[in-house]
Amino acid sequence: MMELQNINLFMNDKNVLHSINLQWRKGESIALIGANGAGKSSLLKVLGTLVKPNSGKLKYPSDLSVKEWKKLLGIVFPETFLYHSLTAYENLRFYQKLYGKINKDRIDEVLKQVKLFHVKQEIVDTYSKGMKQRLSIARALLHNPTYLLLDEPFDGLDSESKEILKNMLLQMRQKGTGYILVSHDSEQAWELCDRAVLMHEGRIIAEGKCTNQGYFPFIKRYREIVKEKSS
Amino acid sequence: MTFINQVVLILNRDLRIEFRSKSLLLSMVIFALLFQVFLQIVFDAKTQAIQMIAPGILWLPVLLSAMLGFNKYGSAERENGALTGLLVSPIDKGALFLGKLIGNYVLVFIVIVTSVPIFFLFLKQPFPASIGLLLTTLLLGSWGFVAIGVFLTTLAHSSSITELLVPIMIFPLAVPLFLAIIQLTEMALFPSLGMGENLWILLLIGYNLIFTVAPTFLFDLLLEV
């Protein structure tokens, strides 16, 4: 289990994360919900070891080292991390080697999953935004991560690609891959996750299980809390 | 994956990207050649007079070309957040530094191979008295300069003024390197002018070791944010 204990993060003298406590169990999918500037992406950066918190403690699963934690982690951020002058295949091969796992079949498998197998030898620069996003997802899944961080993965995708990604996430959930999903579409995030965490101005203000009937009461409660805090 | 494999992986990727477009390599080579021609026009002097400044004229196009490379080399990483992709991966950051250093050095080496013969051709310089010393100086001197350039460029990657920061920081740090390469080049071209070449070579080797070994071991720490 990954655990954040009392995490505080300052960026440009602004406290973007306030005393965050979060437990992320293996195989658990969490929806991070909140308005722009709530601290969702900053929280993902802390989990992705991109930003070091100013105070607090990160307890990695089974007391893993940071390097071992990175091997278990897959990341989809708004930036694709792709090299635009390389082909899709070359990009994935590079990232696969980076994680020390060389398996040509796995590359073909993820390319088929994101429906890019037929264009794998084309330069990424010739791809549309949606195709790049799909390739970025393939890149993140390539090393079979146990934990996945997804920051707005549906952004820039057409409806068909959204459906592909949605099915992939549901499959991963069944296989026991845990993920944290940040999405503008909170209803969709709710549908794809086990637990929802509400954030407001760098704080976690509510948590709840993503039950079938629970979405609207949860969002209603969220709006009430935000209103209370703003007034 | 071993450290060496990681270095080779970064090097392969960088060279594949660079040789696919060739835009940076061509810019560096053309810049160096044009600069040599420009210097030939500016210093249209007698052979004797040119001896005073010959080492500087030989090195200037190479060093400025290398500077051109520092900012552009690896720009693909900055544009698409690919450096972030590397930072969140389990790669040893020292391997990242060494891979980029060797990749950049290959480009500078190509510049040397094209620019230095032009120096002798255009500036009507006699064949160097000590070709071995000249080659050693060129190889060691350019390695040192590239090492410090890659070190500073990668360190300043998150700054919005990387392009300004590197030229400002590199020259003060490279003063010992410049002293050594100018002295050694002078001795290689005109052996009667200097002595104590071993000392300068030792300085060059020491400088290279510091700026190669220290970043390799410290990069994990330095790139931690």
Image: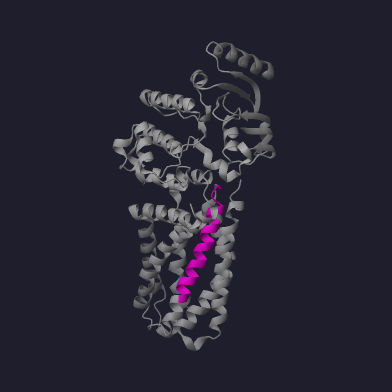
Q: Nearer the viewer, residue A94 or B44?
A: A94
A47 versus B62 height, above or below? above
Image quarter in which the C terminus of chain B is found: top right
Q: Nearer the viewer, residue B117 or B14?
A: B14
A69 versus B27 height, above or below? above
Q: Locate residue B178, reporting x and y percent.
A: 54, 71
Q: How many marks?
A: 0
Tell me which segment is drawn in magenta.
B136-159
B207 versus A194 height, above or below? below
Choose top left, top right, bottom left or bottom right for residue A127.
Answer: top left
A123 versus A137 height, above or below? below
Residue at (59%, 61%) from the top-left corner? B214
Q: Nearer the viewer, residue A27 or A121?
A: A27
Q: Nearer the viewer, residue B174 or B16?
A: B16
Q: Locate residue B217, reporting x and y percent.
A: 59, 58
Q: Residue furthest bottom?
A: B192
Was residue A186 drawn as part of the magenta stretch in this picture? no
- The reply to whether residue A140 is visible in this rendering is yes
Query: Left or right: B164 with respect to B17?
Result: right
